[in-house]
Each structure stands twice: as structure tokens, then as C-alpha cells.
Image (cartoon, grey):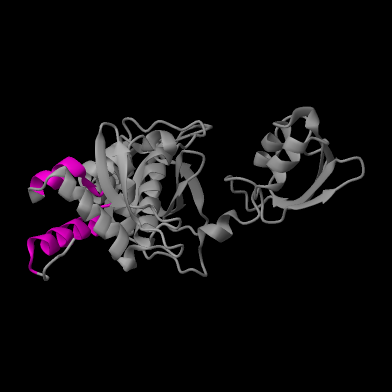
Amino acid sequence: MSTDGPESPVSLNLARILHRLLTDPRGWRVDDLRAQLGIADRTYRKYRAVLQQHFDFLFDRDGRSQVIEVRDGDSRWLRLREPDEPAEGQVRFFARAAALQLAGQAFGFLDATPLGEDLDEFRRDFLDRSGDRTFVLGTLLRDLNRKLHHVQDAPKTYSGHAPVVATVLHALFWCRRVELEYEAERGPSGPKVIEPLTLVVWRSALYLVVRYRGGRKPYPLAVDRIRNARVLRETFRYPSREAYSPERLFEGSFGFFIDENAPTTDVELVFANERWLKLYLTERRWHPSQRFEDLPGGRLRMTLRVRGLRELWRWVHSFGDDVEVVRPCSALQGAAPE
């Protein structure tokens, strides 16, 4: 097919087709292509052949043309072959879409709070910036809630706690003191003035690390147990990194509970000769100090050095007869530690 110069109808039509293929991952539906260019199917097939045979920059390393025609339902589409390695832009788009989807599921227990509402807003903003929203939603992100799934770990419910979460966020960002009451395990407390330090997510629940006015020791509070919280006009100086960091606060603890006065304990556990159990244990980071060793007979030894045994006790007893406590035997058997 002769193009007769760059401004000929054939050249312009080929340019329009090429631009569509390079800018739209769906390509161009053949019926729409013919209608917009005003050409018959025979002419379309000639255009397709020219693109497949004479545009060298559209060939892959094996000499194949990247221009293909595919069927999608009852329609024919002209598009570029999907590359073996996705383009960087696609990788970033898919990663961001997956991150937002998983974050939405992981923090689904916060739907009724400002955090959950704003996460939904971020997702909508991301979709609004997509070049072709219909294609993105109808094709790329279709069934994404089933392709990506987060299993909640007995999430707490925050229905009715939105004002508390909003108060906590306001005080955190502005370094303002908060007066509140707290529903502790031993009973409700009277009004206390606290300085919020860190909002922590642990096992599908929110905790607020605070220190009391005039104090230096940090304490964790369950956000859903906070009552009658109000931000005061008083501000406080957020502690330096040397004085406070959440990493150091939980360092050595097995789980979330903090007991700075608890002694550091060497723990040795021996697990049964079960392949699934070994994989389950060794593929995870339970504690920074954990060490594993295969024993004769196929059993697995685990050693670690922890501060406080409350959470460790619960974790060990979840394995039932598949674990033997070598040390400290007395502390990890019987009733749970206080």
C-alpha cells in the first residue's frame, strides 16, 4: 500500500492508529476504528498488514510484530502484544492499586472513623487520575477485591468511636494535651491529662501510647476504651528521639504489652517433627532474637530472649502438645502470667 507522502489520508490514518495503540493498552476496537476513519474492513486489513510488516520499531527481539488482533467477546480489537516484562509505569500502577486495596481491607475495621473515610478518599483520588476510568475499573481493577484479600485478625469495631479517633489525631499532630477517662481492666478511671505520643496498629486494633502530664514513662491505651476525650489548649514538647522511640519501647517484648520492670528471660522451646509446623515457624519473624536449630529425630529447637512472658505464654500454649517448654518451664506452664 502506497502512502503517497506524510500528509496523505493513508499516512494520517496509520498515524492515528499507531498513536491509539501506543497510548491505550486496550488498543482500538475494530468496528470503532473503521467507523472513525471511514474505511471498509478490507482497507482496515491492509492497514493492519502495513503496521505488522513495515514498522520495524514495533518488532520484538525475535522479529515478531507487536501489533496483533484479538477477540474480546463478540468484538475484534487491534492492540499491541502484552510484553513479557511489564513497563515500569504498569508496575507502579499495579503496585499502587494493590497497596490501596490491601490497605483498605487491612484497615477496614476503621471504616466508621476519619482514618477509614480518608483512605477511601485516597482511593477515589487515585482512580480519578487514571487516564481511562471506564477501562481501569471495568478491566484492570475488575474483581480486585477477590484477587487481593486480607484476612482480619479478630478486628475490633470502632463504630461510635469516630470522635475519639478524630480527637487523638488532632492532639497528635498539634502536640496538645488531652483530658480523658479510661475503661481499664480493673475498672473505669477518673479524668486524666495525657500527652499522646504514638498511634499504634496491632492485631486489627488501635492503641495510643501516652505519658501522663508531668511524667516520662509511656503507657499504651486501647483507643476504643477512651471515654470523654477532649483536647486541651495546653501544648507539650514532643520528646526527642533519644528520650523516646516506639521501636525501643517495644524492643525485647513478645507482642505488644509493655513491662519495663519485667526481667529478660532466656526461652528454649522444642517443637514436634511436623513439616507444616517447621515451615510455619521458620518462615516468620516472631522476635528479633529468635534462633532455630534442627535436632536429631526431626524436631526443631527455638531459642529467644524476651522481656515479659504474658504474650509469649499465650503463643506457646496455642501449639498444644506440639511444643515442649525446656526453659523457663515453671513460668510458661499453668496459669497465664500476670
User: Left or right of 157: which side holds 77?
Assistant: left
Q: How many numbered marks are there?
A: 0
307 left or right, relative to 228: right
Q: Locate the N terminus and report the quarter of the image it occupies.
A: bottom left
Residue 294 in percent (x, y) is at 84, 48
Does residue 279 belong to the magenta stretch? no
Residue 45 at least partly seen: yes
User: Which quadrant of the view contains residue 230?
Assistant: top left
Write the residue at 51% across / 67% down.
243
Would you place residue 297 above or below residue 240 in this image?
above
Would you say residue 229 is visible in this rendering?
no
Residue range corresponding to the magenta coloring: 7-36
Residue 242 or 134: which is nearer the viewer? Answer: 134
Please state which of residues 40 and 335 is positioned toward the viewer in this rendering: 40
- Furthest residue in direction front, as rendered: 1
Can you give x and y, in whole percent of width and height, for residue 93 in the image?
34, 54
Q: Residue at (40%, 47%) from the top-left corner? A: 98
Q: Position of residue 271 (x, y in %)?
A: 81, 38
The residue that appears at 49% across and 68% down in the rendered structure is 241
